[in-house]
Image (cartoon, rainbow, N blue to C red):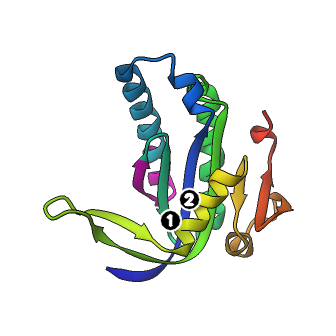
Amino acid sequence: MEKKAALVVVGDIEGFFRGSEEWSDEAMFKRLNSLFEMVGEEAEKVHGRLVKLVGDAFMMELPYDSCDDAINYALSVSRTFYKDFSDMGTGITFGLSRGDVVAGEMGPKGDKRYDLIGKTVNRAFKYANQFRGVILGPQVRAGIRSEEWKLQAIEGGYLLLHPELER
């Protein structure tokens, strides 16, 4: 177990439950697996680590100073989702949070897995579940280097305004 600074990205499919009711369990499993393979491939491109899958949601860890990479990641995954996975839901909401986490192996003996815990993680999940779109916490906003991103202040964070996200 170690305390460290990290950038946490949480993604959650919007409207997944409604669409999934029409599929067999096997079809749903295969479709989610294909999506998560793409999510993992995109994570590797930005030096991210896919940490957790929970139903139709996922959590990824990025290096602390990767704010612009995290935004590009969210846009890339969204782009591919709308192109290849739109039958699964209405879009993917992302929560991006940056700060201290506790990282390490946890779980039952013999089946420990790497995980992240802490307020930074909780905020990323909150952003992904409370709002729609790509939501950045204030710490992520402060770490952006590019001036190309247009942001709108919302309660507790910032909404990324981008033509590819307007559906």
Quick check: 40 above or below 17? below
User: What is the quadrant of residue 164 in the picture?
Assistant: top right
Q: Label 2 near label 1: C-beta < 8 Å? A: yes
| Residue occupied by mark 2 | 9
* Residue type at tag 1: Leu
Q: How far separated are the C-alphas under marks 1 and 2?
A: 8 Å
In-front residue for pair 13/148? 13
Compared across the picture, whether 105 is left or right of 24 comes to: left
Q: Quadrant of the C terminus?
A: top right
Q: Residue at x 62, y 49 (%)?
A: 74
Quick check: 41 above or below 150? above
Q: Residue at x 59, y 34 (%)?
A: 80
Compared across the picture, whether 37 is left or right of 135 comes to: left
Give the crowd class for mark 2: few <14, some 14-19, many >=20 residues within 10 Å: many
Compared across the picture, whether 138 is left or right of 80 comes to: right
Span highlighted in magenta in the image: 41-53
